[in-house]
Amino acid sequence: MAFTEAHENYIKEHLAVREGERARRLLEGHGYAEKWFLEAVWWPAFGHFQHLHPEYEVSDFKDGYRFLDFAYIRGPLKLAIEIDGYGPHWRNVSRIQFSDHCRRQNDLMIDGWKVLRFSFDDVKESPRYCQQKIHQLLGRWLGEENAAAEADWLEKEVIRLFLRSGGPLTPGEVRQRMGIGEKKTRAILYDLARKKWILPHSGNERIRSYRLSSAGRDLTL
């Protein structure tokens, strides 16, 4: 499925279960920067929008409500993702507004949220950097909380990476795009090859690249 169709379905699905201010906020708050983040960063990195909620409502320290650009909620993990544009909003922010912004982030941390903030410049100019930061956080959290889940999740993400690339990949390319270490990369590739989901593409004694097998291509991820 192409991004445009997937994005339209994604917004429709969330609108279908919202009403009032929550629906209005999604219609008005999910704008140019947020859609660009999904198209340039999230979709190439994951190929789906599972567990990702746009314009997600959270309570604040004033017993009111605020909205996160995106919330990734998976089991006990709560990740807030904010896209910040450098414009009049930031250049003209008052001291009171700046303090309020800091308090908002503190409240999120106290409530158990992990927070990633990306400038819109990085989303546009350095989407790979943004992808790596998200992969690193998710990989580290899964490693700390559940090593088995981490392996399962990373294996699926590597298979998706092969599907998106459409050709062979070297261990170095997998390591760079996933934002994980060399030892972990080789362990994942070894396990995927053992399961016959990927096959050696080049190299004899030392495999230099892998390609997706028919079994790996048929996986439902």
Image (cartoon, helix red, strand yellow):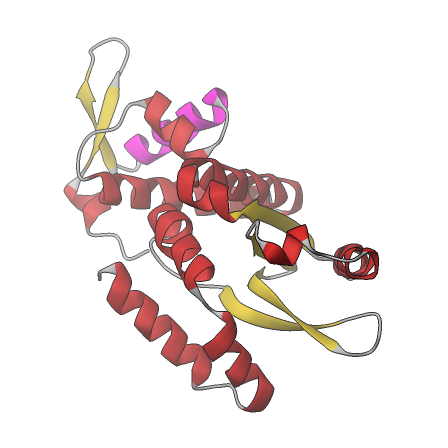
Looking at the magenta stretch, what is its main secondary structure?
helix
Q: Quadrant of residue 104?
A: bottom right
Judge whether 40 appears above or below 20 on screen.
above
Q: Residue at x 40, y 79 (%)?
A: 13
Residue 99 in sight from this viewpoint: yes
Q: Residue at x 46, y 21 (%)?
A: 182
Q: Is 83 covered by the magenta stretch?
A: no
Does residue 79 show up?
A: no
Q: Is residue 150 left or right of residue 165?
A: right
Camera-side residue of 69 and 175? 69
Q: Which quadrant is the N terminus positioned in?
A: bottom left
Instruction: Reply above or below: 166 against 19.
Output: above
Q: Is residue 189 magenta?
A: yes
Q: What is the x, y in percent for residue 155? A: 39, 41
Q: How many marks?
A: 0
Residue 4 occupies quadrant: bottom left
Residue shown at 45% from the left, 42% from the top: 131
Check the image and name the residue furthest to the bottom.
20
Residue 26 spot, x, y in % from top left: 50, 76
Range drawn in magenta: 182-194
| 182 up-or-down from 85: above or below | above
Q: Quadrant of the C terminus?
A: bottom left
Q: Nearer the viewer, residue 92 or 177?
A: 92
Above or below for 173 versus 79: above
- Residue found 50% across the figure and 68% down from its top: 54
Q: Is residue 157 left or right of residue 73?
A: left
Q: Is residue 66 left or right of residue 118?
A: right
Nearest the viewer among 184 and 29 is: 29
